[in-house]
Image: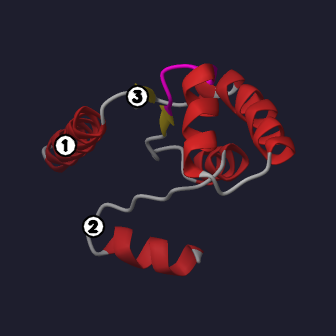
Amino acid sequence: PKKAVTDMLDSGKNVMLEIEVQGALKVKEQMPEAVLIFVVPPSIAELRKRLIERGREEEAEIERRIEAAKWEFSQSPKYNYVIVNDDLAECVKETLGIIKSANDRQQMIEKLLSEI
């Protein structure tokens, strides 16, 4: 819910949302300062392999997910960052680095504004 997110932001906390592309772009519309991170698998072939290995979906559903992913990938230029998830630990490290950088930037802006 939006209020929960704004309450957390107002209290100085970072908020991470795991949402689909349409939702992320809507957030960016309403909050231009939001930092969007698009996490992608190394390739469509790897995505297919991961979906098959999970064993939770039939082939038709996997193909539907692959087609949806292709469209989502085409939207990645609208994001601030793209991270390739080929190694989970590295993906987490990159994500934390982006969050730290965004926080540092915000603190610098607040400091500069306070001096005006």
Q: What's under tag 2, amino acid-wise?
A: Lys
- Sooner in the amino-acid sequence: mark 3 or mark 1: 3
Assess whether residue 41 is covered by the magenta stretch: yes
- Sooner in the amino-acid sequence: mark 2 or mark 1: 2
Q: What's under tag 3, amino acid-wise?
A: Ile
Q: Which residues are magenta?
A: 40-44
Q: Residues within 10 Å of mark 3 (few under 14, many from 20)?
A: some
Which quarter of the figure is the C terminus placed in? top left
Q: Which mark is residue 13?
A: 2
In which quarter of the view is residue 64 placed? top right
Please state the horizontal and vertical placement of residue 29, each as a whole percent of the image. Answer: 65, 46
112 or 71: which is nearer to us?
71
Which of pointers 3 and 2 indicates the residue nearer the eye? Answer: 3
107 or 67: which is nearer to us?
67
Q: Residues within 10 Å of mark 2 (few under 14, many from 20)?
A: few
Q: Which residue is mark 3?
A: 83
Q: Which residue is mark 1?
A: 100
Q: Which mark is residue 40?
A: none
In the image, 108: left or right of 81? left
